[in-house]
Amino acid sequence: MNRLAGQQSGFDLGNTIESKTKGIWMWCVPHPYKEGHTLVLLDTEGLGDVAKGDSKNDSWIFCLAVLLSSTLVYNSRGTIDNTAVEKLHYVAELAENIKIRSTEVADEEEEEEDFKFVQFFPSFTWVVRDFTLELVIEGNRVTEDEYLEFALQLKKGMSKKVSDYNLPRQCIRNYFPSPRKCFVFPSPASPENMTRLESLQERDLVPDFLEVTGRFCDHIFHNSVVKTVKGGHGVTGKLLGHLVKIYVDTINSGKVPCLDNAVVTLANLENQTAVQEALKTYQTGMEKMKNKFPVNVEDITSEHQKFSSLATSEFMKLSFKDEKGEYLKKLKEAIDEYYVGLLQENEMASEKKCRDLLKNLFSDMNKWLQEGKYSQSGGYELYCRDRDTVVEQYRREPNKGVLAEAVLNEFLNERGPEANSILYTDTKLTENDRMFQEEKEKNALLEQKYKEQEEKRMESERMLQAEKERQQDQMRQMQEKFNKELEQQKQEMDRAIESKLKEREEMLKKGFSEKADLLNEEIANLKKEKESSGGLMKEVVTPILGTLAEILPAILNYKVLMKGLKRI
């Protein structure tokens, strides 16, 4: 274990008859070959320690080691004989100490799940320490792996003695996927040096021991897979921490750890975090846009689409088993709420900028109005000319935001009485002139109102289009996520089916036809479950996508209502 960590010392080796390790110790180091991966080493206390006097504690330690690891390394001393296999009786208790489905599942279904453990349990490696024998069986040299499989061979017969002999071997075959590995280590040093192993230099160790150590480390580095939970979701450091707490709390409460329950609890914890992190991604991106307010509708909807897509990607990366779309819906609602707030802030910024601009542009006219420039004969013509010049200057001003025409329309209407007063006090104009100018003024205001409505219509259409594109992106990402999770589930099934096929071949070769028939049935059940999992995923995905489609119009109507727009 220390060698796997690239160190000479670390986990206490123990040089006395007293057991050193208590419970399970963890050591995390960067994976030497897989970038972005961490190698987590778990060192358990020795099983069968006479000082403890509590065999149940050993069972739970073994159970936790199985639940938390992707590769289980069991080490024993001397040889793999019947005594060594019988000491591994904890494996026969796994079906009692670990459940796949929730306890609410019917008893008959519970009885059928033993053969499914191979889908979720770690690969199995048996390490034999201080091995001194020749790897020879019936006069032929064999490999270490063949030695292990020979030790795990079943005996024919129905007697209690044969059943007791076969039980731990059958459980190892049933629960741990093929191929199983074995490494036999000679003693690492001379007897006089065994008490100071941690301080020995590499040159003081037996060369054969170093050779096996190198092969063992290479096997773990290159063949040990990423730890996953039921369903094939990869375990991160944070998830592993949650997983440990869930299992230990369950055991301490007197209950049996359940893979399904653990996944549900993990999924809820991770999906809550996924929503928070995804929303943070959206908010952080959109905060930069706030500094540019006011902006036009194209700019804000474009950024909204961009960061909404990034937020969805972040959610999909961190979440798993959101089978009802509950947490994706929460993310969508949180983003929409934040977006509506941004739209309101952008409108307020646009309104303020436009009003300030008009106030500044009309300042000279206000001064001239007070000085009586427009009260003289021909004043109305001067007023209209100056006002039209100001409006033209206003329209040339860039970056006024989404309420440019609306604010201008409101502003001109507010000044309507002023224009009307000047019109009727201008002595140069005849009654017919006044009627003509009054009609012209009404038409100008109507034209401005039309421009405001056109601005709103174009804005509404752009928002609608942006939301539809955003929804399509979200649905695409969700479909990809479910396809990935489905593929992970299928890989779990394939691994189990492949292992069962190898076991069946071995049973047929050794003449265990009844066991081969049982394996055939198990293989058929696994294949059937694999085929049905695709249909089940579709049944889950389709309603969720439909729910998203229903959410879209409601959100858009709300936004349209907030902005006083009419659906065209």
Image: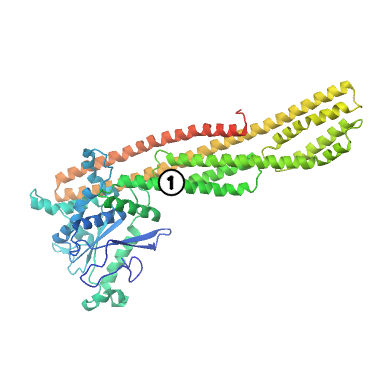
**The residue positioned farthest toward the front in the image shown:** 370
Q: What secondary structure is found at the residue carrying circle 1?
A: helix
Relative depth, front residue between 71 and 511: 71
Q: Is residue 349 above or below residue 15?
A: above
Q: Residue furthest bottom?
A: 192
Q: Quadrant of the N terminus?
A: bottom left
Dot 1 amino acid type: Gln
Mark 1, residue position: 272
Quarter-of-image position of residue 301: top right
Farthest residue to the top: give it: 432
Q: Position of residue 427 (x, y in %)?
A: 91, 27
Residue 361 makes an appearance in the image? yes
For the point 8% across and 53% down, the residue is 161
Percent of width and height locating residue 492: 32, 47
Q: Is residue 155 visible?
A: no
Image coordinates of residue 282 in percent, x first then y, are 53, 46
Which residue sits at x=59%, y=31%? 561
In the picture provided, is 205 more to the left or to the right than 465? Answer: left
